[in-house]
Amino acid sequence: KPMEGRISDIGPRKYNEFFPPVIARNFGKWLYHEILEPGVLVHVAESGETCYTVRIGGTRTMSITHIRELCDIADKYCGGHLRWTTRSNIEFMVEDKATMEALRDDLNSRTFDGGSFKFPVGGTGAGISNMVHTQGWLHCHTPATDASGPVKAVMDALFEEFKDMRMPAPVRIALACCINMCGAVHCSDIGLVGIHRKPPMVDHEWADQLCEIPLAVSACPTAAVRPTKVEHNGKKVNSIAIKEDRCMYCGNCYTMCPALPISDAEGDGVAIMVGGKVSNRISMPKFSKVVVGYIPNEPPRWPTLTKTIKHIVDVYAANANKYERLGDWAERIGWETFFKLTGLEFTHHLIDDFRDPAYYTWRQSTQFKF
Ligand code: SF4
Ligand code: SF4
């Protein structure tokens, strides 16, 4: 049915059509909320009504059978309501404690063939919630790493922290599979970014036939792409030349022109950034900083990447004060000490300071004293 102020059916229907009744009744009138245990929250409204939320870990790509099972659970306990969060967590909301407990126990009891959790309850508070991530090799055209693969491997290594809340503070991890950063990598406690390290290859045979060459030229942020004529199969063809020392391997030109593929088994991999956050608590929001410049892609389980992330998390958990986010901790002890404690190799490429004036004068920080 048409919604107020909406004159077309373009786009998703307005979110409030889908509210569970307790949310609709108390919209904008919530007094407070608490985390009762890992993965379980209660919101209390001015009216005295309560809304219990049970959060479980999901995946960004799910089978139909898995989604059907989630819907069956929502039908059984929540009047058919459930919601997906931006971190691919799934939340079920119920109105009373007894139903919440039955729902939580049901979710925790469901396993894959009696083995691993199908719907693990957790992902709240001072723990490690699910990772925000991007499309990866499955779905996008410019990835320098996969998304679902490394995210699964990293979250398997950190699974106990998803089910618990024993970190000093929330640890938010994100992965973007190229530097377009569709994920929230720039402001995460730990960010994984797929990076290309080689310029695109030029397929002279197809450039003129597959691409609007002026579009590819204008897509390049560093003016590294220019039109040219080349000799190909004995005849002159219109094509593209890349000025390689200007290229920053962003892949924008490939977005415009399929004859400029940039993926490369040797060149592609992952950089690790840490210390970003959007929270205002203790200190202002901050950008993440690069602490590992390159780790090769090692599908299917990304062992070096996974080990490095687990190590950073362990060192943070062992050394930070309660309530201190990873970036707050690194700033308190000094980034020099961060590198000493973690044992990560420091190189001059890692010097960065994203405070505004420094941002405009790129890489001029004197904060590092090695
Ligand atoms: Fe595609 Fe890059 Fe976004 Fe990944 S981060 S989904 S490769 S644009
Ligand atoms: Fe330009 Fe980016 Fe293409 Fe390099 S990868 S040529 S910087 S658009």
Image: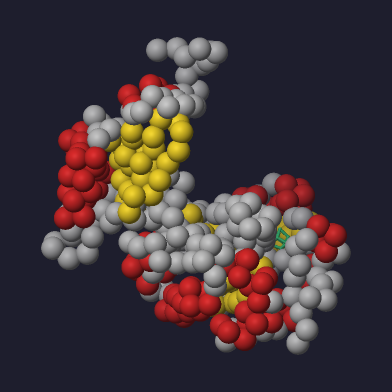
Image quadrant occupied by the N terminus = top left
Tell me the residue at 28%/33% (across/down). 95
Residue 87 horizontal/vertical position (percent): 44, 51
Pick out the residue farthest to the left. 114
Residue 81 horizontal/vertical position (percent): 30, 32
Q: Is residue 310 left or right of residue 21?
A: right
Q: Nearer the viewer, residue 324 or 260?
A: 324
Residue 286 horizontal/vertical position (percent): 67, 58
Give the total number of marks visible in the rendering. 0
Tell me the residue at 36%/41% (across/down). 42
Residue 77 placement: quadrant:
top left
Residue 270 horizontal/vertical position (percent): 55, 71
Tell me the residue at 76%/67% (across/down). 353
Q: Is residue 55 visible?
A: no
Tell me the residue at 47%/14% (across/down). 3
Q: Is residue 285 left or right of residue 305?
A: right
Q: Nearer the viewer, residue 274 or 25?
A: 25
Q: Is residue 212 visible?
A: yes
Q: Is residue 71 left or right of residue 89?
A: left
Look at the image and name its color scheme. secondary structure
Q: Is residue 357 left or right of residue 58?
A: right
| In this view, 365 is above or below 56 | below
Image quadrant occupied by the C terminus = bottom right
| In this view, 307 is above or below 247 | below
Q: Quadrant of ligand 2?
A: bottom right
Residue 118 placement: quadrant:
bottom left
